[in-house]
Image (cartoon, helix red, strand yellow):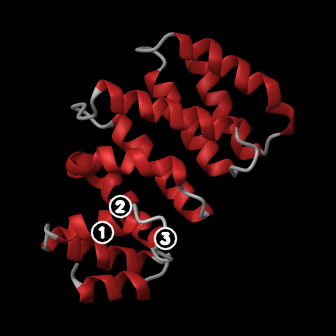
C-alpha cells in the first residue's frame, strides 16, 4: 500500500476539495485504485468511510472503473456499520447498477437488489441510503418484475412515518410502477 496515499486519505475530509484531490491522484495513478478499494472494504479501518467517499465519486464519474473490484465491494458493503460508509456505498451500488453497458454479473445484480431491499426494511438505516435503495430497485424492476409488488408493499407499509426526502423518492418510484 502506498503510505503517502493512505496518509492523504487519513488526512482527508468530506469536503469536495479534499475528495477531488484524492480522485485526481487515483486517476493520475490508476494503481492506487487497488489501495483505495482495499481501505474501503477493510471493516476494521477507521478511515474506511473516507475511502468510500472517494470510491463513491469515482463510481459517479465512471462506475466501470470499479468492475475489477465489484465483487469485493458487493460482498463487503452489506457489512458496513459507519453511517457515512453506508450512505456512500448506497450510491456506489446505485451507480454500478445503472451503468451502461452493464458490467455486473447476474449474481452481482442480485446482490445489489438484496442489499437495497435490506436497507429499505432496516429501521436503523437513514433516509439517504433508503432513497438510493429505492432508485436502485426501480432500475431493476423491469427486469425483475416481482420487485414492483415488493416495492409497493414496502413503500405503502411505512410511507406515513417516513421523512419528506424518503416520500419524494418513493413517489418518483411509484410513478414508474
Which residue, given by chain and number where applicable, does mark 3 sit on? 44
Tell me, yes or no, if residue 92 can be seen here: no
- Local secondary structure at mark 2: helix
In the image, residue 67 lies at what x, y percent? 22, 45
Mark 2 and mark 3 lie on one chain; the one further toward the N terminus is 3
- Local secondary structure at mark 3: loop
Say whether marks 3 and 1 touch (CB < 8 Å): no
Q: Residue at the front extreme?
A: 44
Tell me the crowding category of disc 1: few under 14, some 14 to 19, or many 20 or more residues within 10 angstroms, Cα based. Answer: many
Which residue, given by chain and number where applicable, does mark 1 sit on? 36
Q: Residue at x 31, y 24 (%)?
A: 106
Q: CA–CA distance between discs 1 and 2? A: 8 Å
Of 10 and 152, the residue lying toward us: 10
Q: CA–CA distance between discs 2 and 3? A: 18 Å
Mark 1 and mark 2 lie on one chain; the one further toward the N terminus is 1
Say whether marks 1 and 2 touch (CB < 8 Å): yes
In the image, residue 157 lies at what x, y percent? 80, 25
Q: Vertical placement of 66 versus 162: above or below? A: below
Q: Vertical placement of 103 versus 6: above or below? A: above
Q: Residue at x 39, y 64 (%)?
A: 40
In the image, residue 148 lies at what x, y percent? 58, 14
**Residue 109, numbered circle:** none
Mark 3 and mark 1 lie on one chain; the one further toward the N terminus is 1
Q: Residue at the right extreme?
A: 161
Which residue, given by chain and number where applicable, does mark 2 sit on? 55
Of 75 and 82, the residue lying toward us: 75
Q: Vertical placement of 1 versus 176: above or below? A: below
Tell me the crowding category of disc 3: few under 14, some 14 to 19, or many 20 or more residues within 10 angstroms, Cα based. Answer: few
In the image, residue 107 lies at what x, y percent? 34, 27
Q: Nearer the viewer, mark 1 or mark 2?
A: 1
Amino acid at each position: 500500500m502506498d503510505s503517502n496515499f493512505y496518509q492523504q486519505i487519513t488526512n482527508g475530509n468530506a469536503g469536495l476539495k479534499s475528495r477531488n484531490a484524492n480522485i485526481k491522484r487515483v486517476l493520475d495513478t490508476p494503481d492506487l485504485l487497488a489501495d483505495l478499494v482495499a481501505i474501503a472494504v477493510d471493516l476494521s479501518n477507521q478511515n474506511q468511510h473516507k475511502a468510500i467517499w472517494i470510491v463513491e465519486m469515482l463510481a459517479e464519474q465512471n462506475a466501470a472503473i470499479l468492475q475489477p473490484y465489484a465483487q469485493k465491494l458487493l460482498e463487503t458493503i452489506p457489512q458496513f456499520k459507519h453511517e457515512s460508509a453506508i450512505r456512500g456505498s448506497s450510491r456506489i451500488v446505485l451507480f454500478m447498477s445503472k451503468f451502461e453497458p452493464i458490467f455486473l454479473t447476474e449474481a452481482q445484480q442480485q446482490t445489489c437488489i438484496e442489499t437495497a431491499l435490506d436497507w429499505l426494511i432496516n429501521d436503523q438505516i437513514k433516509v439517504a441510503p433508503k432513497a438510493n435503495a429505492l432508485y436502485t430497485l426501480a432500475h431493476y424492476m423491469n427486469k425483475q418484475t416481482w420487485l414492483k409488488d415488493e416495492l409497493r408493499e414496502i413503500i405503502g407499509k411505512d410511507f406515513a412515518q417516513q421523512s419528506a426526502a424518503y416520500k419524494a423518492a418513493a413517489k418518483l418510484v411509484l410513478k414508474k410502477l
